[in-house]
Image (spheres, rainbow, N blue to C red):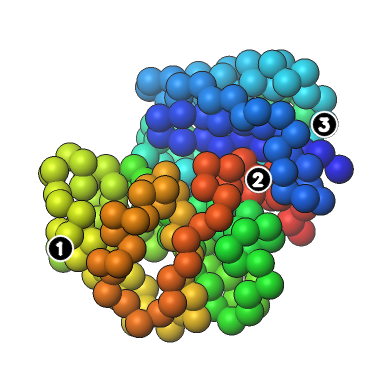
Amino acid sequence: MNVLGIDVGGSGIKAAPVDMLTGSLLADRVRVLTPQPATPGAVAEEISGLQQLFEWEGAIGCGFPAVIRNGVARTAANIDPSWVGADVAGLISRATGCPVSVINDADAAGLAEMTFGAGQGEKGTVVLITIGTGLGSAIFRDGKLLPNTELGHLWLKGEVAEKYASDATRKREDLSWERWAKRFSWHLQQVERLFSPDLFILGGGTSKKHEKFLHLLEVDTPIRMARLFNDAGIVGAALATSLP
Ligand code: BGC
């Protein structure tokens, strides 16, 4: 089966049809800018445009940067606040006429890595952290997802962790990689204390620059870099349609 995967982010919305058996993209992914303000109506319109571009009539899976419960957004840290309480799945379904499943964006990236990437076949506790505008998280126990963990919202040095240690903060505060890696290590250490993971997987846009910071991280848990990079969000969004 093929599913149109859509990854909604704070700055871009990416989409491509995904082969669910192999996790490969069946066409080049298309990226459009996230409308500003990223209100429900404006985002749904962009998604409808992407659906038309791919002439898509089947199932759609959508990754969204918020806590998602039964298709409804419960938070909106890096997206317009008007999303809180919005029925994301219903809205996109009405805009496209397709059946839609919605999942948190980091959970989507985690699903993709566990199924086709760096976490394939991994048992035990695996924690994937996405590094980008925010810090996303996905926790797996023996391959099964515990959704909506939002570890980027843990408290760190008197601030929300993602405000202190995200890539957006590194850029905004012009931090050296050494200083940022120290902050990010503290975040990982806190996650270690809480969950004693067997493996960390680091994904998100910034994971592409891993040669700048991987050797600077100070944690006991083994770290693996995500393998699907930019495609993880799209592939994992598509996989959300097969979750129970
Ligand atoms: C949001 C998460 C999201 C993460 C990465 C955070 O601000 O609260 O839901 O997974 O950003 O996009």
Q: Residue 33 appears at what percent x and percent y?
A: 45, 22
Foreground: 163 or 37?
163
Q: Amino acid at mark 3?
A: Gly
Look at the picture and state if 31 lies above or below 19. above
- Outermost residue toward the right? 1
| Secondary element type, mark 1 | loop
Residue sitting at x 60%, y 67%: 119
In the rendered image, the quadrant that contains the C terminus is: bottom right
Residue 58 bears which disc, if any? 3
Q: In the figure, residue 18 lies in which quadrant?
A: top right
Look at the picture and state if 157 lies above or below 125. above
Q: Could you tell me how many numbered marks the image carries?
A: 3
Q: Is residue 42 left or right of residue 124?
A: left
In the rendered image, the quadrant that contains the N terminus is: top right
- Outermost residue toward the front? 211
Q: Amino acid at mark 2?
A: Val
* Crowd band around label 2 with a 10 angstrom C-alpha radius: few (<14), some (14–19), many (20+): many
**Does any atom of ligand 1 lie closer than 8 Å to the CB of label 1?**
no
* Crowd band around label 1 with a 10 angstrom C-alpha radius: few (<14), some (14–19), many (20+): few
Distance between the alpha carbons at the discs numbered 1 and 2: 35 Å
What residue is disc 1 on?
158
Distance between the alpha carbons at the discs numbered 2 and 3: 15 Å
Foreground: 174 or 107?
174
Q: Is residue 65 left or right of residue 187?
A: right
